Amino acid sequence: MLTLGTIVMGAADVRRAAAFWSRALDYAPRDGEVQDLWTVLVPATGGGPGLALGLSVTPVQEHPRVHLDLYAPDAAEQQAEVARLVALGARHVDWDSYPEDPDFVVLSDTEGNRFCVIDASHPGTST
């Protein structure tokens, strides 16, 4: 059986992206240091998929087909995590596809990659 090992994202500045995602997720470089062209971050403690960051000159998609969903246990924690991530360098995205009562907030990382912070306690959210 297959398992999810690594999620790969492009970055114009791998070191900047690695600094953001390391602090955002409490991840660390798998090989002990971040490289300019490619690096893999892994959970500092415990298990979970790796996050690989590769140098890319491809423009960021406004509506990406694949993105990360990060789960917060409730609305208060979601709000706190959004504020923390913005303080780390994330930006709010003016998302044109929010439903009437969204359980998610769309942000972009330091490289413009979109991701969502989900309120896992919101009615209808399936984790």
Image: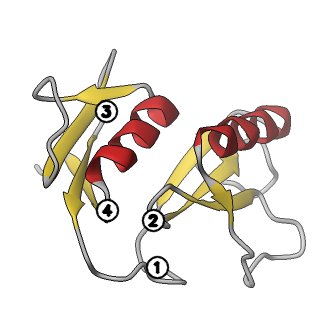
Q: Residue at x 69, y 54 (%)?
A: 125
- Give x and y (percent) for residue 15: 29, 45
Reading the image, the residue beneath label 1 is 64
Reading the image, the residue beneath label 3 is 48
Q: CA distance from mark 1 to mark 3?
A: 23 Å
Reading the image, the residue beneath label 2 is 67
Give whichever of discs 1 and 3 has the lower sequence position: 3
- Give x and y (percent) for residue 16: 38, 47
Specify the amino acid type for callout 2.
His
Q: Is residue 63 above or below residue 45?
A: below
Q: Is residue 106 left or right of residue 61?
A: right
Q: Residue at x 29, y 26 (%)?
A: 28
**Can residue 46 be seen at all in this image of the molecule?**
yes
Q: CA distance from mark 2 to mark 3?
A: 17 Å
Reading the image, the residue beneath label 4 is 11
Q: Residue at x 21, y 48 (%)?
A: 6
Q: Nearer the viewer, residue 86 or 1?
A: 86
> Which is more foreground, mark 2 or mark 4?
4
Q: Quadrant of residue 44?
A: top left
> Which is more foreground, mark 2 or mark 3?
2
Q: How crowded is the residue under tag 1: few (<14 C-alpha within 10 Å), some, or many (20+)? A: few
- Give x and y (percent) for residue 9: 30, 61
Q: Residue at x 46, y 79 (%)?
A: 64
